Amino acid sequence: MDALQLLAQGFANAFTPENLLWVLVGCLLGTAVGVLPGLGSSMAVALLLPITFSLDPTAAFIMFAGVYFGGLFGDSTMGILMNTPGQASAIASTFEGHKMALNGRAAQALATAAIGAFIGGFIASIVVVFLAPALADFSSRFGPAEFFALAVFAFAATSSVVTDNVIKGLTSLFIGLGIAVIGIDGVSGAPRFTMESPQLFDGISLVTVTVAILALGEVIFVACLARHDTAKKIIRPTGRPWLSRKELKEATPAWLRGTAIGLPFGVVPAGGSEIPTFLAYGLEKRLDARRKKPQFGRGAIRGLAAPEAAGNATTGMAMGALLALGLPISATAAIMLAAFRQYGLQPGPLLFDRASELVWALLASFFIAMVVLLILNLPFAMLWAKLLLIPRPYLYAGITVFCALGIYATSGSTFDLLMLLGIGILGFLMRAMDFPLAPLIIGMVLGPLAETSLRDAAMSANGDFSVLVHSPITITLYVLLAAVLVFSVRGRVVARRRARRAVTETEKESVAR
């Protein structure tokens, strides 16, 4: 009951006209910035940080919460409409969401994303309010061996589930891992794969890689290879900007499953919401393979609903972990941690005592932001969908400009612009040869975590690598990994048998005729 009373006080503080205005401003800015390739929610928070120093801390962080959640929806919007997600966390939503848009269901896809974001974020906010101590205890049990096991689980799961070709999936993963190790070694201080270039001493930015692979690579692909194909597939956003009863019945289980997957990852620093979105997508894809008429690959609504709910559930829990533990789970959370320190506040257990009004007003603003985003985005789903009516040459030229502006705003370096072009060409080649892009991004996001965790675990055990399988958590993760791989192999074998049977039956029918 204490939590309910404190939350009620938080709502009383958040429901002032000024704070409601900042929630609205944050949601609008987050969504608008998230729509632009290369300018995700983390970029928006970073750019707004100097401006908010003149604001009251409560108003500033309430606005940041709106930017955080709004940015996630904006990231998914461009992934659905143009197959160019704003950040890596929206990649999984593009697989089926963009196919829905190509099939003339862009408005329904955006409505699915908006409702999924609302459900995932709202449930996560409830969990943060009532179960934060237990979740904090769970996170504190993770050591280097557990983090390494989690990274290996993510590597294998994304390489085997998201792609239909394991060899190409592993190749893409190792490319991402190779990019991740470029720079100064954190332990020895020796430069690795820098070619004696000072510009590479800090490594290659994840933002640069994400924008180049996903956005610029898509632009080059459309310009060079898909010209005739895209001319035949002019997307017209027609239809209703809401979901029918049948679509709601189809998407609801996926929203709930995605939320359940995303919640635990909000308290584990494993790269943000990228892993749970891919895992949620992979689960729905495996479940779809058991149906008589599989829908994945043709715009399955469950393939969009689950990643959206998982991503926002992780984000909501990540904010709870930041407040209760001072633990930044994602880049945006890390920037917000810096903002807390600029105001002389240190997130952690003591924050709930020293700045109780701010904490509970911020928690209350999570619920308000969810409702505001739902109200803003559902009626305007058709408006966002009309972006698809822009002629392709102008549209992709604009995306290219925003890609370059986003990267230059991040670093202010022309070298990063050249790196953007080079990696963009790599993304084009991978698309042309049908290599999956998701394992590359996952490899780069989790590569440093896996390397550091492996080193720390080995050093703590004096070089005894058996420490990697000593704890119950690591054993559980490896068992789950084995189960995922077994089911993945079994699913492929069954799919091949069905394909062979279909070919055999077709041949028999042709002979009979």
Image (spheres, rainbow, N blue to C red):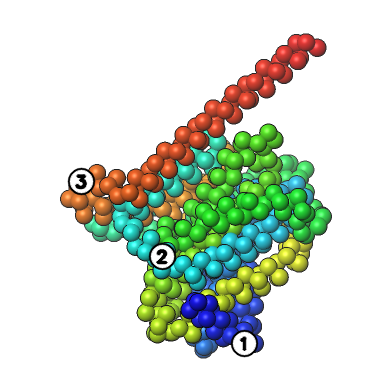
Disc 2, SS:
helix
With respect to residue 486, does 499 lie above or below? above
- Residue occupying image coordinates x 57% and y 73%: 366
* Residue position for label 2: 134
- Residue occupying image coordinates x 59% and y 41%: 287
Q: Position of residue 503 (x, y in %)?
A: 67, 20
Q: Earlier in the sequence, mark 3 or mark 2?
A: 2
Closest to the observer, 128 or 303: 128
Q: Earlier in the sequence, mark 1 or mark 2?
A: 1
Closest to the observer, 375 or 483: 483
Q: Earlier in the sequence, mark 3 or mark 1?
A: 1
* Residue position for label 1: 16
178 left or right of 376 in image = left
Q: Position of residue 135 (x, y in %)?
A: 42, 64
- Rendered-image quadrant of the C terminus: top right
Q: CA distance from mark 3 to mark 1?
A: 58 Å
* Residue position for label 3: 464
The answer to whether marks 3 and 1 mark residues whose Cβ atoms lie closer than 8 Å is no
Tell me the crowding category of disc 1: few under 14, some 14 to 19, or many 20 or more residues within 10 angstroms, Cα based: few
- Residue occupying image coordinates x 34% and y 57%: 142
